[in-house]
């Protein structure tokens, strides 16, 4: 406990005037709308890195652990990874510039200050004094040459799945797009090889064409948006020509067009969305829907239909809401989002997530549509597809499992009265666990697997696993898809809300500065680990687990309740994926301590 409170006191003592100004400005900007915010220099730089998916440094992800700076992971093929001199778990206690610069002590230094010292220009050297993870009784100095680090894990990726339907089998290409990124610096200086979502997807479509796919899925689930230009350009890969989006400011109306008649993919198209698909994702999905170019599947999207631009403010930047965008049909995505043609079960609660749940969100409205040449309507397909899906939904083991688990969770969440008698409470808990076990065993039996005695060790268990993935949007008609490679299934935290029973204060981006050490503090971390262990039904070595937190641009960056007393509660919205927890958090959110 002494370490915990000493660390908290140290963090508070390191608060700077810039931190206070950031907090003040975000309190002011919050009165405008949920997406207007102030970015101090450090956060502004991280935002640019997130957009271009590259930086100049050594390629390591850092985390504060008490007074030390700990290496959490290394970016694959980055300078640190290639050097073999730095390993996850190593603790950095000093940093020196160049081959012979003085090594300065960084113990107790803020993580952003450490990152500032280790980042640097390409082809320069940095020396790190470390305590190796494998030999903590010695120290040593390593020298690493800085280089451009490509954050490829956040780029668009493809895979091909074979789907059996009736007597035939079909090759379905899947392109997952985590966000709409672009290297603005390279773009503005005329570099023809600049990194962007559209250029990457174009390459992937070319590769998929060689594999002779029969259909394509664009997976925009949990894609929080990004560059408006990229959303428009990506739409153009699937259309001949025409407008893609309308943008209305206070003074004028502008429109973006696809003027390139070349179509990169002309086959059947399905766009997969969920409640966390926002902003640029909704522009793309809305255009595909209006043009009748494909079918939208999933759940109602986030509903962020506003445009932000960055304005310089002192040494930082102001992300200011300056416009609203509209689909070519004239409909806004603001507040209501994009509705799918075929709806999947809702994993996220619409009244607790999405634009409509945010205070001060701008209302939905419409403007006149713009002339555009849509493809022949797909209306004749919607009804038979919806009926076929509903029929499969009633018999598919994966869908049945998902819906029963969701129903059980809702039943627990909507309870307003709890008995104070501990025996009755324990009996209710046992009944709930038995219901969980029954649901999982029904699913396991349908797959020809043996039953389990404890919840969480079946469909999501890990003894061992073959990448089970039970979620809305599986393309395998036989149920959950299997990746074919052993991976452990982990809980992915989508949103943290730390709240106090007594009182709270709403923070903007500054909240993330304090959130990581709070969540990784022993008492809170213990509760998080307990939640995960309960879900997956297996023990976790908490010493090997670190929670990384960063806002996702395009989805309510910030706005976290910060605890002021020791009465801390914890609310978590989560979904299971067949990926390692650390890798997934890094993939989806990046990390404030990326170098």
Image (cartoon, grey):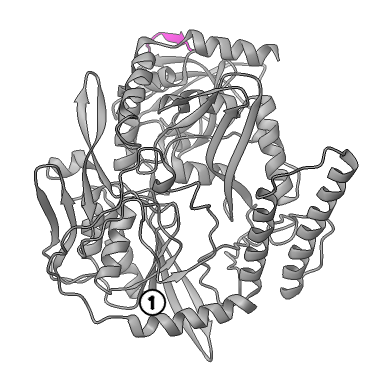
- Specify the quadrant of the image occupied by residue 285: bottom left
Q: In the current view of this chain or complex, which residue is farthest to the front?
A: 417
Between 280 and 234, the residue placed more toward the observer is: 280
Judge the density around disc 1: few (<14), some (14-19), many (≥20) Cα neighbours within 10 Å: some
Q: Position of residue 316 (x, y in %)?
A: 26, 23
- Residue at image x 67%, y 64%? 404
| Magenta span of residues | 100-106
Query: Considering only vertical position in the picture, is 140 above or below 59?
Result: above
Q: Position of residue 224 (x, y in %)?
A: 38, 48
- Residue at image x 64%, y 54%? 410
- Residue at image x 44%, y 85%? 384
Rendered-image quadrant of the C terminus: top left
Between 75 and 438, the residue placed more toward the observer is: 438
Q: In the current view of this chain or complex, which residue is farthest to the right?
A: 423
For mark 1, give the secondary structure.
strand
Residue 272 inside the magenta-drawn segment:
no
- State whether residue 462 appears in this view: yes
For the image shown, how many numbered marks are present on the structure?
A: 1
- Specify the quadrant of the image occupied by residue 235: bottom left
Taking the image as shown, residue 282 lies to the left or right of residue 327, namely right
Query: Considering only vertical position in the picture, is 511 above or below 293?
Result: above
Q: Position of residue 128 (x, y in %)?
A: 47, 19
Rendered-image quadrant of the N terminus: top right
- State whether residue 70 appears in this view: no
Residue 102 inside the magenta-drawn segment:
yes
Taking the image as shown, residue 366 lies to the left or right of residue 575, namely left
Q: Position of residue 474 (x, y in %)?
A: 53, 68
Query: Considering only vertical position in the picture, is 422 above or below 440?
Result: above
Read off the residue under disc 1. Answer: 215
């Amino acid at each position: 406990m002494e370490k915990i409170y000493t660390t908290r006191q140290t963090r508070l003592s390191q608060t700077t005037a810039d931190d206070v100004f950031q907090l003040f400005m975000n309190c002011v900007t919050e009165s405008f709308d949920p997406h207007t915010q102030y970015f101090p220099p450090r956060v502004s730089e991280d935002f640019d890195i997130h957009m271009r998916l590259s930086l100049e440094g050594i390629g390591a992800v850092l985390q504060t652990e008490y007074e030390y700076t700990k290496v959490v992971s290394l970016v694959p093929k980055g300078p640190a990874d290639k050097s073999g001199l730095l390993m996850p778990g190593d603790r950095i206690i000093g940093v020196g510039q160049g081959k012979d610069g003085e090594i300065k002590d960084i113990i107790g230094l803020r993580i952003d200050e450490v990152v500032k010292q280790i980042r640097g220009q390409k082809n320069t050297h940095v020396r790190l004094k470390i305590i190796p993870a494998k030999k903590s009784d010695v120290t040593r100095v390593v020298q690493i040459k800085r280089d451009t680090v490509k954050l490829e894990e956040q780029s668009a990726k493809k895979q091909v799945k074979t789907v059996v339907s009736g007597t035939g089998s079909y090759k379905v290409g899947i392109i997952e797009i985590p966000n709409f990124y672009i290297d603005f610096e390279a773009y503005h200086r005329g570099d023809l090889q600049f990194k962007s979502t559209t250029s990457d997807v174009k390459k992937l479509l070319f590769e998929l064409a060689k594999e002779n796919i029969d259909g394509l899925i664009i997976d925009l689930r949990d894609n929080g948006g990004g560059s408006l230009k990229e959303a428009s350009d990506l739409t153009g890969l699937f259309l001949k020509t025409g407008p893609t989006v309308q943008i209305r400011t206070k003074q004028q109306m502008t429109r973006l067009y696809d003027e390139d008649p070349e179509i990169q993919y002309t086959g059947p198209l399905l766009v997969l969305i969920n409640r966390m698909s926002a902003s640029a994702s909704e522009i793309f999905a809305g255009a595909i829907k209006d043009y009748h170019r494909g079918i939208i599947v999933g759940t109602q999207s986030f509903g962020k239909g506003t445009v932000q631009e960055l304005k310089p403010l002192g040494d930082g930047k102001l992300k200011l809401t300056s416009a609203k965008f509209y689909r070519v049909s004239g409909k806004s995505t603001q507040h209501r989002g994009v509705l799918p043609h075929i709806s999947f079960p809702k994993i996220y609660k619409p009244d607790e997530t999405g634009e409509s749940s945010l205070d001060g969100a701008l209302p939905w409205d419409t403007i006149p549509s713009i002339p555009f040449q849509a493809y022949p309507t797909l209306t004749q397909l919607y009804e038979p597809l919806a009926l076929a899906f509903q029929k499969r939904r009633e018999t598919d083991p994966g869908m049945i499992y998902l819906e029963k688990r969701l129903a059980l969770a809702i039943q627990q969440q909507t309870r307003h009265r709890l008995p104070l008698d501990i025996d009755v409470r324990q009996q209710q808990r046992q009944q709930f666990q038995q219901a969980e076990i029954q649901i999982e065993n029904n699913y396991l039996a349908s797959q020809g697997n043996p039953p389990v005695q404890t919840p969480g060790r079946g469909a999501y268990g890990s003894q061992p696993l073959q990448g089970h993935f039970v979620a809305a949007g599986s393309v395998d008609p036989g149920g959950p898809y299997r990746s074919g490679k052993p991976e452990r299934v982990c809980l992915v935290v989508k949103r943290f809300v730390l709240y106090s029973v007594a009182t709270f204060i709403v923070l903007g981006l500054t909240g993330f500065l304090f959130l990581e050490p709070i969540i990784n503090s022993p008492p809170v971390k213990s509760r998080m680990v307990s939640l995960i262990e309960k879900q997956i039904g297996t023990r976790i070595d908490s010493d090997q687990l670190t929670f990384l937190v960063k806002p996702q641009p395009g989805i309510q960056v910030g706005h976290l309740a910060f605890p002021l007393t020791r009465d801390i509660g914890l609310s978590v919205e989560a979904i299971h994926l067949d990926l390692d927890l650390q890798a997934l958090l890094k993939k989806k959110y990046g990390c404030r301590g990326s170098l």
